[in-house]
Image (tube, coloured by chain):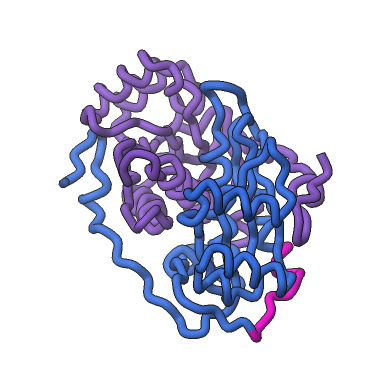
Chain colours: A purple, B blue
Amino acid sequence: MEFFEVVKKRYSHKAAFDASHPVPEEHLVQIVEAGMAAPSAGNGQSAEFVIVNDRALISRIGEITGSVPLKTAPALIAVVSDPGEGGPGVSSYLEDYAAATENMLLAATALGYSCGWIDGPLRDPAMRATLSELLYIPDDRQLMALVPVGLPAEPGPRRPKKPFNRRASWNRYAVIR
Amino acid sequence: MEFFEVVKKRYSHKAAFDASHPVPEEHLVQIVEAGMAAPSAGNGQSAEFVIVNDRALISRIGEITGSVPLKTAPALIAVVSDPGEGGPGVSSYLEDYAAATENMLLAATALGYSCGWIDGPLRDPAMRATLSELLYIPDDRQLMALVPVGLPAEPGPRRPKKPFNRRASWNRYAVIR
């Protein structure tokens, strides 16, 4: 798909997926490879990925989080990062994982899927710990986000964006707030 | 350009740009609009953009940072964010700005330009303050990164990425470290 069409089509799917349509493994690999191609501070490549397509495991993650998209997704990608990457004061693990995740959302969209970037449930330390244990994530790594991928049960809406001059200006900060 | 070709072509240009080839304003708008289309926590759209194509201003930024790509870029985009966005403990301004920046790097690549994500000089608080003043960035906003865009003086190398199984695994964390 043409790049700017992908950018325009990408949206955060917050409702149910069609669990009966699996995502082929080669598509999941293509999506994760796009994530791996994202830039990272000092090319440190701190973002890592657990690709989940085991039906029972997805159900378990859905139950734990109570999230409809996670419960129904035919596949999901857990994004993991290394909070110690880069060292104190210069760690870029948040930027690294975010750039990789955005590449994966765009790649999933380019392949005709809906997807989402779910990190809300991970703000609960107990829920994060339970999910991390379920995915065998080691203590020196942090589960950052869950990205469900699949065909939507029904296509969801794109959310409206602010007009250009409320977020951008030329040659000096003059954003209309 | 086809999406996966864009992902494969994007690289961090760390050398000189060809300052004699300006980037048309409509391309800069297209790049920034791609940034605006990125997801953000709660659709808060915290990332903002100062598009710099004033030659004297770019020279000044180049002098202050000592960065060759910034000195020679025909245009650059300063990415600004709101560190207070979302509130204490749930602020996602780093992820928001990173996803927007990644969209812009891909968009610049799709339009045939080279680009980069420069935040190293901003780690120096004095340099960040000087640049923020130069761009009239208000106290409640933070300058996050500078994205030079243009034709390269000479094409730069893509940096090698780790093999798949050193960053990804299936259904449990089993990345080979």
Say which of A168 and A89 sits in front: A89
Q: Position of residue B6 (x, y in %)?
A: 50, 67
Residue sitting nearer the eye, A113 or A160 = A160
Residue at 45% x, 81% y is B155
Can residue A108 be seen here? Answer: no
Residue furthest out toward the top: A126
Relative to B155, A138 lies left or right? left
**Viewer-nearest residue: B84 or A150:** B84
- Depicted B112 relative to depicted B135: above or below: below
Locate residue B10 relative to residue B27 in the image: left or right: left
Specify the segment rendered in magenta: B20-29
Residue A73 in the image: above or below residue A71: below
Q: Quadrant of residue A171?
A: bottom right
Please give the name of the residue rendered at 41% of the width and 47% of the height, measured from the top-left corner: A96
**Residue A163 picture location, percent across and down:** 80, 47
A169 relative to B85, above or below:
below
Identify which residue is drawn at 57% across, 41% down. Answer: B96
> On screen, A69 above or below B13?
above
Residue at the spot x=54%, y=28% of the render? A16
- B119 left or right, relative to A5: left
**Number of numbered discs:** 0
In the rendered image, is residue A109 in sight? yes
Query: Image quadrant for the C terminus of chain A?
Result: top right
Seen from this angle, which residue lies furthest front?
B126
Q: If the image is split into quadrants, where does the N terminus of chain A sit? A: bottom right
Instruction: Tell me, yes or no, whether the highlighted magenta stretch contains residue B146.
Output: no
What residue occupies the far left of the structure in this picture? B176
Point out residue B88 in the picture as x, y percentages from the top left corner.
56, 21
